[in-house]
Image: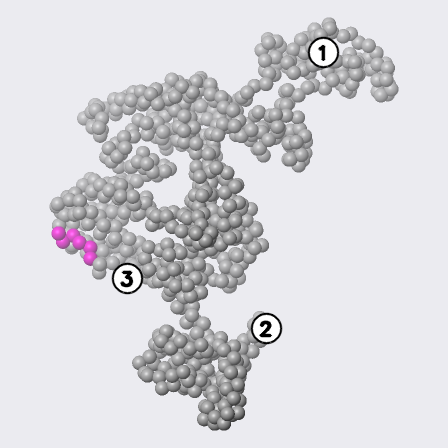
Amino acid sequence: MVHRHRRAAVSSPAAASAGRSSGLLEGLVGALRPEFRSETLCFVASDPVFGGGECRVSGCLRSARGRGLCPGHHQRWKDEGREDLGVFVDTTDPLWQRQRPNAKCRIELCGYGVSRSGLCQLHFQRWARSGRPDLDTWLSEPPTVKQPAAGARCWIAHCELWPQATTPFCHSHAATWRVNGRPDVEVFSHGFLPVANRADETIRLDGLGPQLKLEIQYALQCRRDEMIRKTMPAVVMQVVRFLTTTTACSLLEHTEEAWRAQIGRPAPKDGNPRAFLIYARRKLEDLADADGWEGEFPRDIWQLRRLGCDGNQTLSFTGIPQAWMRDLVKRWLRWRLSAGLNLETVRRGLRSLTRFAIFCQRVGVKSLGDIDRVVLERYLADLHAEWAGRQRHNDHIGQLASFLHAIRQHRWDDSLPATALIFSDDYPKRTELAPRALAEQVMAQIERPENLDRWDNPAFRLITLILIRCGLRVTDATRLARECVVTDGEGAPYLRYVNHKMKREALVPIDEEVHALIAEQQVRVNSAPWLFPRRTKNPDGRAPVSSSTYRLALYRWLERCNVRDAHGRAAHLTPHQWRHTLGTRLLNRDVPQEVVRRILDHDSAQMTAHYARLHDTTVRRHWEAARKVDISGRQVVIDPAGPLAEAAWAKQRIGRATQALPNGFCGLPVQQACPHANACLTCPMFLTTAEFLSQHRQQREQTVQIITAAEARDQARLAEMNKQVLANLDRIISSLEDDHATVDEVADAG
């Protein structure tokens, strides 16, 4: 006997299939609404899912295809030399080719259609018999010809021409009638009537069997309800015609892989019909099998769309060989999904536990009770041999530790030994990540107005500015709500967004330019709920643009702008690097670290501290490169690669923090008391660089004034003290000016 979860026992696969088919048929009949039960489904051009949008030519009711034109007008536009599309749309006849009037004989009082040389058949015969004289002269006095009975005209409704001879049609329509085998006059005439729907706007299901017909109708109903993407009737008809060539009575008779191999040409060709067929099968499978968690949990491949997740993502447990381990991992992942963890975190846990399960099978672990500290130590060694301290190494250990902790916390299985523990010392020390902020040379090219104007999509241009100036993650930026701007009591604008990583709302101040561009974008998207709705397969604007779509557009834009790095190579960057760049820029401008943390909405100061390290490194690099002189103007050299470089920099940082000088730095060890307080320009520990030249020049002027006043008042001691300061200032200024001039000459030469 074969048992299915929450289903009656069945005796064979055939019986199971029959029971599933019977349940599916009942479900289809109950779920299908009356408007989708017809064998012939017609859709107007403006239908949000099954219509292509109305043709741009006013008065034409057919669905648009290429260039916003229906197939007929698109072909006419090409036949007329592909003139300016706007002019063509404004001037062309809205009637279809078969509805346009046939040419009339050039003789004014003649109502027959043209046969040859602009004349009807009878007038052409008269002209030919008269020896074909000059036609314009001959037309001035044309002969009379036999006319039809009064009021007679072509049977085609829109045609005003006289019928030709004994036929009921004008010359051209009579020729078409004869070519088509002289069908019934009424039937032939009906083919020229204006129709609300052409063949490519109609879905005919009369060629399918009863259940297949219901299945396609149900799939069409699901597409309408989802309102996610366009499904053209022509694509559906390709699937219908394919199904009529098979012996299948239901789409569930074959697997997805089997249907993919059968329909159309090999991928990627015929992608749309294949995609709709697979979509229809998945919807039927969900209808037949979906039962929430109770139905999905026992399966070894979870279809996450049945559990409320977007898309067609799955979690596969087939890589875990032990049944007991598989059940525990399922419970763990179900709990994590229920707790709101994002899907990628859950996937990482599944990958880590799949690896651990394979290891356990290899070393002979038969049950949970066999997993003790000895097994874990062997596994830690196995992990180190493969990953050797890389980021995934830590992740595998952390996921396993979380799994073991959850088993104990929720009492899923009390057989887990008490020694099965992961300790903090088991985690390898993390490698310090390299700085990811972009060089200012690259940023200068990116932020040039002429380069920003190279964006061909204003929405992507705005996303770029938001990423650069606000530091959002790219997913948070592309998923901004339409109403995303709030103002404070003073009218200052803020961008309100959802920090998806932290699962909370956040605010970040924005400048007036970004505020104005957001207002323009809100007008462009009309009533869509997102500020950046997806441009295709999004009839009602409910889907935001994906981050991958923006990334591809970004890389194309960087190529157009020819952005280069310091070595002249094409610059490669990720949108997330703009977040690092903003944090580093703010810290380099002395914005407090806590303020930067709030702007970037970091959860802890540890993340922001990484930017602080970048800031400290930036300042140190400039300090090491600067020419430092003492009070005598002599250069002070500190080797940045020397054994005391770190200690010298630490002393310098402490000196800057404890002795704030307006014109240089204190070189005195912090442990010593200063005997020269407020007299640094006579202190042998004083150091300065060219960045303080303006302060030195200003102080020199003030010192000269003090000396002059002291001498006028006979204050010899005061004058003498300041003369020493003046001499030191002269030496410092002279030395720093020489160095500054050398730097300028090198810059000019470059």
Q: How many marks on residues?
A: 3
Image quarter in which the C terminus is found: bottom right
Secondary structure category for the residue under label 2: helix
* Amino acid type shown at disc 3: Lys
Displayed quadrant of residue 120 = top right
Above or below, 623 against 579 in this view is: below
Tell me which label, 3 or 1, sits earlier in the chain.
1
User: Quick one: which residue is furthest to the top in this view?
Assistant: 149
Decide: marks 2, 1 in contact (CB < 8 A)? no
Q: Position of residue 277 (x, y in %)?
A: 41, 29
Which is more toward the observer, 312 or 229? 229
User: At x 37% / y 74%, what residue is drawn?
Assistant: 657
Within-10-Å neighbours for mark 1: few <14, some 14–19, many 20+ = many
Distance from the alpha carbon under mark 3 to that under mark 1: 95 Å
Look at the image and give the residue range highlighted in magenta: 418-423
Secondary structure category for the residue under label 1: loop
User: At x 39% / y 31%, what residue is drawn?
Assistant: 278
Q: Position of residue 369 (x, y in %)?
A: 13, 47
Q: Which residue is mark 1?
A: 162
Confirm whether the magenta stretch covers residue 70.
Answer: no
Within-10-Å neighbours for mark 2: few <14, some 14–19, many 20+ = few
User: At x 44% / y 48%, what residue is drawn?
Assistant: 486
Tell me which label, 2 or 3, sits earlier in the chain.
3
Displayed quadrant of residue 177 = top right
* Amino acid type shown at disc 2: Ala
Which is more toward the observer, 172 or 528? 528
Q: Which residue is mark 3?
A: 429
